[in-house]
Amino acid sequence: MVLPRERALAGFRDHFGREPALLVRAPGRVNLLGAHVDHSAGLVLPIAIDRAAWLALSPRENGRVRVAALDMDDVASFSLDALSPGAAEGWMAYPQGVAWALRVAGFELSGLDAALSSDVPIGAGLSSSAAVEVAFAMAWAALGDLEIEKQGLASLCQRAENEYVGVACGIMDQTASLLGRAGHALLLDCRTLSSEQVPLPDRVVVVVSDTGVRRRLSGSGNYNSRRAQVQEGLRLLHAHLPEIASLRDVSARDLERLEHLLPEPARRRVRHVVTEIARVQAGAESLRAGRLEAFGEALIASHLSSRQDYESSIFELDVLSEAAWAVEGCHGARLSGAGFGGCTLSLVEKGAIERFKKEVGAAYRAAVGREPPIYVCETADGAEVL
Ligand code: GLA
């Protein structure tokens, strides 16, 4: 298999007949804990992973952007002066959206030729789209020497996805891709955007198990409809708690006292968000203290809450998670990313990886009838220009 780095470099030479000026790497992410809370100003705990989008590029005149999407076998181009939210379909919406967001923020952009290749699987809950957005944002920031911090770039990428692509996502994926650090999880406070690097114990790895079921957040409506239900819950709670600005401000006590006033499904959506934020807080503490058992319990509770209250799991994700919980040496598992398909993540003792693969693989084959890809995801540093 050709690695995406080599593929991007060779693809650039093939398509544009010269050497690229820059090479950018932007990783995907696995969120250890904190499902669907970034858009409620919550806390999340992602890692950047060793799967990434790679972009080889050079500037070009006349404000045009030509991109060879090597994995899709597709080449397309657009003009920086003709960008309109909602107009683009498919993968081109990401580079266009990033260009649009940077320009709306007042930055001057150069045209470019670029070749893109990624080994972050699409629709698997590993943030393939954020990786592509961040790769382009880093490319334009480097070419134009733009004065913008990484967190600022993350916010512009989020804006691209919210307003240009049309997914009402939070800030987690783009921030993880930009600020992740090898060997660490990023505890990100989505209210203040302050973050802390929490070291991961050496003796465990993050194992990703893939259901093989793919989803598209922009097409399915699932992501946005859940978000709307959360907003509705917040609006109704506001009548009783006028001081709250987001569900982050709702305590467990408030929830207990007021949840019966909310209609379904808003009640369960709100309960997921409020309890999940508390789980991240406690989970980060456990991780810092090396209490992996407690951390693993938070993973399991998170999955159950995603399943019952947020309803973002599917049968295949439940099979993989439950099988993982039963493996000796596995400290908990849960669905990754938005859910609705894609992968689970499990925290596994290094010595138990083979057993994990065998037992989870067998359980999945028995229940679903096919082999699930299962692999270790190493942590990685955030995006960089090479
Ligand atoms: C997607 C979104 C994120 C976050 C997760 C769920 O990955 O892009 O902003 O909401 O789902 O935690």
Image: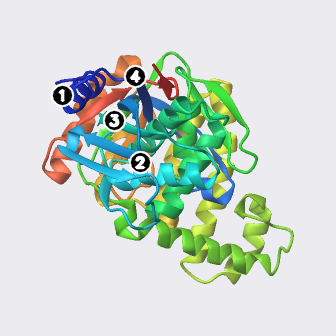
Disc 3 target residue: 114
Amino acid type assigned to the residue bearing label 1 in the image: Asp
| Disc 2 within 8 angstroms of ligand 1 (CB) | no
Disc 1 target residue: 14
Disc 4 target residue: 21
**Is label 2 in contact with label 3 (beta carbons under 8 Å)?**
yes
The residue lying furthest to the front in this view is 62
Which residue: 45% across, 60% down? Answer: 83
- For the residues marked 2 and 3, what is the alpha-carbon distance in whole angstroms? 10 Å
On the image, which quarter does residue 88 sit in? Answer: bottom left
What is the x, y in percent for residue 58?
38, 29
What is the x, y in percent for residue 107?
61, 45
Dot 2 or dot 3, earlier in sequence: 2
Amino acid type assigned to the residue bearing label 3 in the image: Ala
From the viewer's perspective, is 140 left or right of 237?
A: left
Dot 1 or dot 2, earlier in sequence: 1
Which residue: 14% across, 46% down? Answer: 370
Circle 2 sits in a helix, a strand or a loop, which is it? helix
